[in-house]
Amino acid sequence: MTEFAPTRRSLLRGAALWAGATVAGLGPVKRAVGKTLFLNDPFQLGVASGDAVADGVVIWTRLAPDPFDPEALPPEAILVGWEVAADEAMKKIVAHGQVWARPDMAHSVHVDVRGLEPHRPYFYRFQCEGVVSRTGRALTMPTPRMAVDRMRFAFASCSHLEQGYFSAYRDMVKEDPAFIVHLGDYIYESSGGTTVRHHPGPEPRTLQDYRLYHAAYKLDPDLQAAHAHCPWFFTWDDHEVANDYSKNEAPTTLDPAAFMQRKLAAYKAYYEHMPLRPYATFNGNGMTLYQRVLFGDLAQFDITDARQYRDALPCQPPDWHAGRLLDITECADYMNPSRTMLGKVQEKWLRDGFANAGTRWNVLAHSLMFSDFDQIQGPQRGVYTDSWGGYPAARRQLLDMVKQRKVPNVITLAGDIHSFFISDVKDDPLDSSSAVLMSEFVGTSITSESYNAANFASWMAENPHIKFCDDTHRGYVMCDVNKDVWRADLRIAANVRQRETAFSTLKTFVVENGRPGPQVA
């Protein structure tokens, strides 16, 4: 059944309404352009907050009375009112204002609200032409070095709309995280696998195509609820654009110019649909997505971008344009020390962050699994090229940063592989006595399928530093952290092909302060 089918274009789109209605705390919102009648709720895509800091948060919405009709709104700016309150009833207004929803940004709205108090909840909503959005909840971060005893957050990745329902987001709301970190593949550009619902059209290529895809995902009620529950932080992986792409190299086309246009269209649509700070704004060439987040003196998060700046995959055959399993002895370029995953500017930013790290826990949030993963049995060594395994010099450089600066309690978080992997990140994964430098938690997918259980099981003997692997469940990871223990619950769905499904904890791992390496709780 097609759940997100394009709806019929509104016949009375330009009819007049609006005579200066007022919403508490906002005051009249008047337009300087022609008047518009919303025949449908213009806030159908929900509200969201993100990129929270100690004194503020970004709040987002997009006017979309008919999300699948690009002409449902006139090609002109529309004034939107916003307000932030200290209480859920929206009686104690602490900030409010108006902002233009511009057609060149798909009538999306990003408000960088500042001047708020640290480490506390706020509530927000939008209003346009007498219509009021749902109320969202946002939380500000503790100030840097503020003494904080506890932090609770979720991280997730790989949410394929066609392959299941987003019940994991509903479970996150029940688990009540202070924030959510999404590690990529927020949307999928491709179809395939077992389908329970359908994308709104063929594989996207243009800006309007990607806007349709984002709208289809945003219409999911469980995703909307999770966005309204708390602020999110983001990085992307490949499927926000195209499978296994690297910087300006596409796996699906040999025409670099055509792929560049497609990539920039995907980036712009991504910005339009996410509650991102102004520094991330799409500038015509790309976006600055990597960022550092401080949660008081308890944790520092370095959220990286492993797609936009990296070199091409190593030793690609001319007729193959995606990641592949590579025997490293057959690739002379594999150990090339100049090959980068993050790019020189991002590497320096990360190095500077490590130099100033002063928190109890230090988190590296990637889209891709960081641990070494040998995928050939026997004396040969095999890596999947579209992962950190395809960039050994870049991975070695990052490990050396941690060693040289003696960064304590490093936790690395990842997604992409549609499986849980819990690992010791060793200085030398081939030496069982080598020091553990990081603890890695890789989350499974929200819905995206995987059928690698037999292969993964056959490779475990080659990878004793990997303490746990599960390929058969869909879900996410809920983390509860204090000064002494990092706790990670692997949350799993009974059946993502049913909208209403039960959730449980598959397994729990902990990392103790000063003792790197996850242990079964």
Image: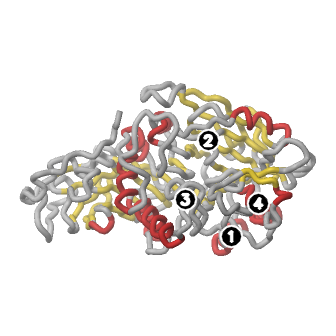
Q: Nearer the viewer, residue 206 or 319?
A: 319
Q: Secondary structure at mark 1?
A: helix
As measured in the structure, the alpha-carbon distance from the residue carrying label 3 to the one carrying label 2 is: 22 Å
Query: Disc 4 residue type?
Result: Val
Residue 432, image x, y percentages? 91, 46
As measured in the structure, the alpha-carbon distance from the residue carrying label 1 to the one carrying label 4 is: 16 Å
Query: Disc 3 residue type?
Result: Thr
From the image, state whether disc 2 or disc 4 is nearer to you. 2
Q: Which residue is mark 1?
A: 347
Q: Quadrant of the N terminus?
A: top left
Mark 3: give few (<14), some (14-19) or many (20+) Cα within 10 Å. some
As measured in the structure, the alpha-carbon distance from the residue carrying label 1 to the one carrying label 3 is: 28 Å
From the image, state whether disc 3 or disc 2 is nearer to you. 3
Q: Nearer the viewer, residue 256 or 188?
A: 256
Q: Which residue is mark 4?
A: 407
Q: Earlier in the sequence, mark 1 or mark 4?
A: 1
